[in-house]
Image: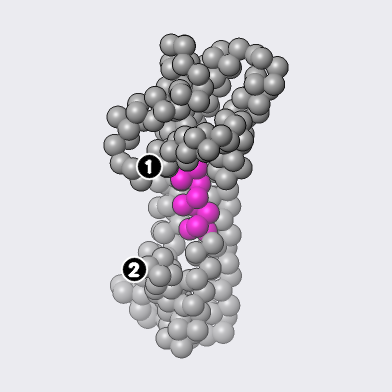
Amino acid sequence: MLYVLAASAAVFGVTYLFYRSVILAGILSPLGILYLKYKRKQLIEKQKNELNLQFKDLLTSLASSLSAGNAIENAFSRALDDLLVLYPSEEVSIIKETRIIIHKLSLNVTVEEAIKDLAIRSGLEDIKNFSDVICICKRTGGNLIEAIKNASGIISDKIEMKQEIETLLSSRKFEQKILNIMPVAMILILSITAKDYINPIFTTIQGRAAMTVCLMLLAGAYVLSNKIMNIRL
């Protein structure tokens, strides 16, 4: 509800600023509900990135426990203790998921099925690949410790590369936000400081048509800039 109200208020403000019509702004303000789809996708992506980073810590702990001679079923219990030191909150995603895996193992569910379930629910490629590695090692008798160490190293390299890219893009993302806000800010400043100069835009058909084209271009620029900045590994 907060996201909808904030988006609706933004739509109302921008529409009124560009058209000077309370009625039109009120009619278009419910379009703010469309923001939920974008925000939901954004929140899911953030949660996936956090889980992926936490999963690397789980793999590191599992590899250490397996190297000490523990079976993989027992290694998850030891890994949970390590994760509780790194992430004290029970609300952390990897803590919840590790507890689910341990619970399934206590019900005689195989470790392959437990990890595969996590891979399906999370939708993360790294966890899916790890699930495939576990299945292959269990079936063929491969070196499970080395496989987990390699998986941990690969995921760590991917995360570090992504963090480097995010660092390089941080200033560009800030510039993107400024450029997206600047046209709206200019209209607001001109509306306050040069009312007679800008008034024809709001009162003539040609002016309203020009403002409509400007809004469409601004929306297109916002979508395009987000796609350019969204680099996936």
Which residue position is annotated with label 2? 189
The percent coordinates of residue 189 (x first, y second) are 34, 68
The percent coordinates of residue 147 (x first, y second) are 58, 17
Label 2 is placed on what type of residue? Ile
Which residue extends farthest front?
107
Which residue position is annotated with label 1? 92
Label 1 is placed on what type of residue? Val
The percent coordinates of residue 60 (x first, y second) are 44, 21
Q: Main secondary structure of the magenta part?
A: helix
Q: Is residue 4 magenta?
A: no
Residue 223 higher or lower than 63, as above or below: below
- Which of the two discs, 2 and 1, labels the residue nearer the N terminus? 1
Task: Tell which of 3 and 216 is nearer to you.
Answer: 3
Task: Tell which of 140 and 166 is nearer to you.
Answer: 140
Callout count: 2
Residue 200 makes an appearance in the image = no
**Quadrant in the picture for residue 22:** bottom left
Provide the residue span drawn in magenta.
Answer: 38-48
**For discs 2 and 1, the disc positioned in front in the rendered view:** 1
